[in-house]
Amino acid sequence: MVLIRAATGPEVFNLSLYDSFVVVDVRPPEQYRLGHLATSIACPCPAAPVQTLAPAAIAQFLNVIEDFYPEHMSPLILVHDGSPACEQFARFLAGALAQAIDRALPAPSSPTTSPAVSAGEASPSFADAALARLYTCTQVWLLDYAEFHAICPQLCDPALRMQDLAPTPKYICPELLTCTRGSIQPAYYTWFGITHFVTHGPPPAHEAVPDPARTGISSFFFYVNDSLEQDLSDMWTAVCGIIDAATRAGGRVLVRVHHRAMSSSCAVAYLVHCGIDIETALARVSAAYRMPMRLAPRLRAWARAYEPATPGATPRVWQRLEASGALRALPAPAP
């Protein structure tokens, strides 16, 4: 059974489109030329009534799949412009695809492998292979282009090429993004409006840190080991203070502390700081990473004992960390 549902801009952003998800843009050609998701393929809404389009729409879509041959078939994203006609076509196409998939023969056991071919038997055509991959789709998402564009218009630049992309950070909430070691490009600091950068210290030579003199980004180092078994309570509280300060100044924070689990623990801590219960916070971060995340040791105890800072005040623990030198701003380079 194929699930069809509306998707938000952050949900699609967190797919990391660099990893070859199928994004089909059904907006009119003139809108597509002005801007579109960097990895999307044009399949414009025709002028004819949608009820007459089922065979042609499916055939056109199969041609798209055959040409693109994506790495991931689910979710499949259909982008519309929010107008009744365009959204109706997107929903019609999603329904037609879902019907074709639901009526099809059982899909191959693995979407990444082709059916075995016996000796002397002809190999399946590329179109058949594309169709087989389509049958592995379990979700179709409908996205209003304006929602994605509002998060990062730079990723909608028609001049942007696939080879220019790299894995993007995870969108946790408007003021907080997280990432892993390899998922940040220098241009992304500007694209995503990063004003504060939180990382582990001292950073290895191969891990770039934004130059404050050139970028205006404030960087903070936490001297923690690459292990979740240590007590990270002071770091979680301090990160909440940094995000609060950045938010008051109209900024945005990017957190990259060692590996995925450690960065995501900071995200859970901040959502708890915002008044969200820890289970809901964990579910939201897991959804952003598209994988189940486990709570870091001591995070539940930290959440029970933690009291959000008074609005406008700096957490006392942050002041103590600054005084002790455990939290250090990156100094400007020597002239």
Image (spheres, helix red, strand yellow):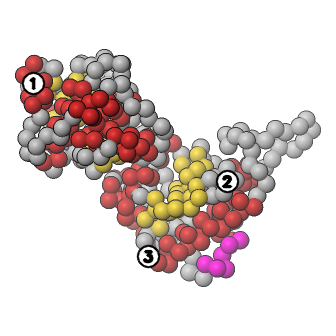
Please tell me the numbered disc located at residue 134: 2
Q: Quadrant of residue 230?
A: top left
Q: Locate residue 283 relative to residue 266 in the image: left or right.
A: right
Question: Which residue carries the number 1 mark?
Answer: 320
In the image, residue 81 sits, relative to residue 210, either above or below, namely: below
Number of marks drawn? 3
Which element carries disc 1, helix, strand or loop? Answer: helix
Residue 209 visible from this viewpoint: no
Q: Main secondary structure of the magenta part?
A: helix
Q: Distance of mark 2 from mark 3, alpha carbons?
A: 27 Å
Q: What range is drawn magenta here? A: 50-55
> Which of the two labelled residues, at mark 3 and mark 1, occupies the earlier sequence position?
3
Q: Report the front residue among 249 and 37.
A: 249
Percent position of residue 183, x then y:
39, 35
Q: Amino acid at mark 2?
A: Leu
Percent position of residue 135, x then y:
70, 53
Q: Report the front residue among 256 and 168.
A: 256
Please tell me the numbered disc located at residue 83: 3
For the residues carrying marks 3 and 1, which lies nearer the camera in this image? 1
Q: Locate residue 314 relative to residue 187 in the image: left or right.
A: left
In the image, residue 103 sits, relative to residue 39, either above or below, namely: below
Task: Report crowding for label 1: few under 14, some 14 to 19, many 20 or more residues within 10 A (C-alpha).
Answer: some
Q: Distance of mark 3 from mark 1, alpha carbons?
A: 54 Å
> Which of the two labelled residues, at mark 2 and mark 3, occupies the earlier sequence position?
3
Q: Locate residue 220 relative to residue 191 in the image: left or right.
A: left
Q: Do the residues under discs 3 and 1 have CB atoms within 8 angstroms?
A: no
Which element carries disc 2, helix, strand or loop? Answer: helix
Q: Amino acid at mark 3?
A: Ser
Residue 119 visible from this viewpoint: yes
